[in-house]
Amino acid sequence: PAAPAAPKASPQQQLLQQLQQQPQSQAQQPLRPGAADASAATAAAAATGTAAAPKAPQTVVRAAVAPFNAASTSQLTLAVGDLVEIVEQDISGWTYGRKVLHTQLQGAPVEGWFPDWCTQK
């Protein structure tokens, strides 16, 4: 007899598995290309004699590992397991992000500030 089929992973679990399979260096790249990226592209274009197309910015998505309840409208409430696209990280320990699946499922993005310790690194 055939073995029972494994339960299908939720969209959150599938996305998280894909992100975890990426090499660490790719997952930790900043959202916006920096000056180093631009100079590397310029050097490559000069070496080959062709204009290199600009690279698309890499997005960083992290899973919430701790809950956070927003205390103001500028903050983002998080539940454990929420997937958040990191938009900006501040040296103060706060991160600005947007919930990933909420946008895909309901249209309007939900975004705001939350403490760094709420998401996995």
Image: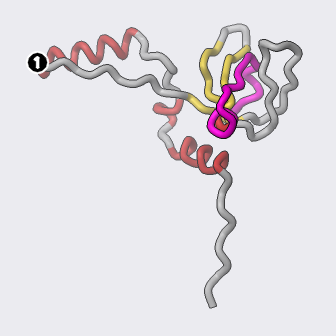
Decide: is 55 above or below 46: below
Residue nearer the viewer, 67 or 71: 71
Decide: is 56 above or below 38: below
Residue nearer the viewer, 31 or 28: 31
Q: Is residue 104 rendered magenta in the image?
A: yes
Q: Is residue 80 rendered magenta in the image?
A: no
Inspect this view and state whether residue 121 appears. no
Residue nearer the viewer, 17 or 98: 98
The residue to which callout 1 is attached is 49
Provide residue 12's location: percent of width, then percent of height: 66, 45
Going by the picture, which residue comes out furthest to the front? 107
Crowd around label 1: few <14 · some 14–19 · many ≥20 (10 Å): few
Provide residue 5's location: percent of width, then percent of height: 65, 74
The quadrant the C terminus occupies is top right
Residue nearer the viewer, 81 or 43: 81
Where is residue 99, by image quadrant? top right
Where is residue 92, by image quadrant? top right
Q: Amino acid at mark 1?
A: Gly
State the extent of the magenta-drawn residues as a range: 102-121
- Which residue is found at the position 47% from the left and 16% from the top? 32
Going by the picture, which residue comes out furthest to the bottom? 1
How is the structure coloured here? secondary structure
The quadrant the N terminus occupies is bottom right
Going by the picture, which residue comes out furthest to the left? 49
Inspect this view and state whether residue 39 appears. yes
Provide residue 27's location: percent of width, then percent of height: 52, 32
- Which residue is found at the position 67% from the left and 26% from the top? 109
- Which residue is found at the position 19% from the left and 18% from the top? 51
Provide residue 58's location: percent of width, then percent of height: 47, 27
Q: Is residue 36 left or right of residue 121?
A: left
